[in-house]
Image (spheres, rainbow, N blue to C red):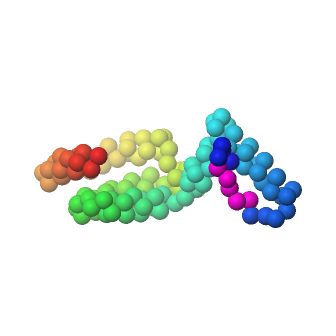
Amino acid sequence: MTAGVEEALRTSDKRVAEKRARARVEEIEHEHEGIVAPKLQRVARHDAVKNQIADYIAALKGDNWDRKYVAKSRARLGRLVTECGWQRLIDVTPDSFVTWRNSAKNLDLGTASCSDQATIPRARARVLRMA
């Protein structure tokens, strides 16, 4: 309940409403001071990584990205999530990524094909035109 913003407390009991309002103000103050992460982050960290990837892929499709780019993005992110063992966003850490990256160096991951190299500048140009 920042200045000028009202939220429904969904109760007709004045004492319950006051208690909920105090709790919400305290939460906002703690977020503002950095004592707790913002609510969106606290809730999102328990979301499945695959849900976030699905949302990202849907956004790419909605922005009319090339089908091949979207398919490769889905495949690469899916592989990363599977091989790192990430289930929820809270599982995604720098250490888990570095561990995966170091183990992946021992595998033959191949090099970018000519078509991959041609796609990168086109994708960058498309983003710049949209900005």
Give the percent coordinates (x, y) of residue 52.
Answer: 46, 58
Does 2 appear above or below 34?
below
Total count of labels: 0
Farthest residue to the front: give it. 4
Rendered position, 64 above or below 34:
below
Q: Is residue 9 left or right of residue 14?
A: left
The answer to whether 52 is drawn above or below residue 33 in the figure is below
Work out whether residue 25 or residue 2 is closer to the camera in this orientation and state it: 2
Magenta: predominant secondary structure element? Answer: loop
Q: Is residue 108 visible?
A: no
What residue lies at 73% left-to-right and 45% top-to-bottom?
25
Residue drawn at (60%, 45%) of the image = 38
Residue found at the far top of this picture: 33
Q: Position of residue 113 (x, y in %)?
A: 16, 52
Q: Position of residue 72 (x, y in %)?
A: 27, 59
At x 41% / y 63%, what residue is drawn?
A: 54
Left or right placement of residue 43 versus residue 86 in this view: right
Q: Quadrant of residue 82?
A: bottom left
Foreground of the two, 98 or 75 = 75
Q: Position of residue 45 (x, y in %)?
A: 56, 52
Q: Which residues fall within the magenta stretch?
A: 5-9
